[in-house]
Image (cartoon, coloured by chain):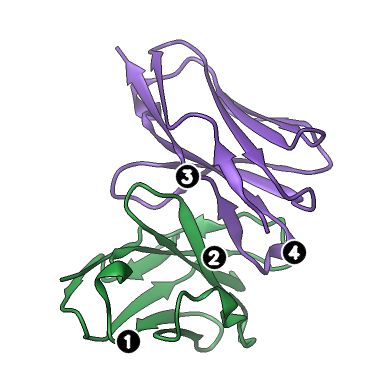
Chain colours: A green, B purple
Amino acid sequence: GAGVSQSPSNKVTEKGKDVELRCDPISGHTALYWYRQSLGQGLEFLIYFQGNSAPDKSGLPSDRFSAERTGGSVSTLTIQRTQQEDSAVYLCASSRTSGGGDTQYFGPGTRLTVL
Amino acid sequence: GESVGLHLPTLSVQEGDNSIINCAYSNSASDYFIWYKQESGKGPQFIIDIRSNMDKRQGQRVTVLLNKTVKHLSLQIAATQPGDSAVYFCAAEGNGGADGLTFGKGTHLIIQP
């Protein structure tokens, strides 16, 4: 497809379980971003990847969150020992280049529900 | 840090009228601004962007105005249609994109028939 894809589209899990969310950016886009959107809120920036470079993890909400990007393309966001406050829509975006000023295109998101 | 806010959580307009959605930002170092539209259950969809060296940019039925002096951004939608009903977010970028986009909380645009 031509757009950013994310999987799964919905994930329901029990408190304390680990979850893994996947993002496939637009082909050829070097920059990849993860955001979190809580119900009725704007988007909160989590982490940014430029190619294969090590990301700045300071935006992640806690040390239960981690993300990686292999081969400069697909990215996974992992949440360990999920808590109810982790329930949100997790959105991924990619842009053609990094360095700012380039449009970020968003995927449809993964809706995570922690029971 | 950056904060981005919207003046109204809900805006209701008559079909065919023009809509104006406003946004304020706090970081004068922000140099790139984007408006997104988000429909229920979908990811944000790019509408229009503007860089800090411009004060106006026009697209198809949409215009973005940037006033750097007062750090204010607006989105004008001409001749609104039912399909324009959505939540509209403004977003600001600084630091070369490394800090991602800072989003406002959104304005819900409702089109009355």
Q: How crowded is mark 2: few (under 14 residues within 10 Å), some or many (20 or more)?
A: many
What number is the disc on residue B105?
Answer: 3
Q: In this view, does A113 lie to the left or right of B93?
A: left
Q: Is residue B63 left or right of residue B83?
A: right
Quarter of the figure that contains the C terminus of chain B = top left
Is label 2 or label 3 in front?
3
In this view, B84 is above or below B102: above
Question: Element type at marker 4?
Answer: helix
Q: What residue type is labelled 1?
A: Gln
What residue did someone put label 2 on? A94
Q: What residue type is labelled 3?
A: Lys
Compute the Cα span from label 2 to label 4: 17 Å
Residue at mark 4 shares a chain with residue at mark 3: yes
Q: Residue at x 78, y 32 (%)?
A: B55
- The spot of residue B89 in percent (x, y) is 50, 42
Q: Which chain carries label 1?
A: A
Towards the viewer: A93 or A39: A39
Q: Do the residues labelled 4 and 3 touch (CB within 8 Å)?
A: no
Q: In which quarter of the image is residue B70?
A: top right
Q: Mark 4 lies on which chain?
A: B
What residue did someone put label 1 on? A80
Residue at mark 3 shares a chain with residue at mark 1: no
What number is the disc on residue B95?
Answer: 4
Closer to the chain start, of discs 4 and 3, is 4
Q: Do the residues labelled 4 and 1 touch (CB within 8 Å)?
A: no
Q: Which residue is drawn at 27% across and 76% down?
A: A83
Q: What residue type is labelled 2?
A: Ser
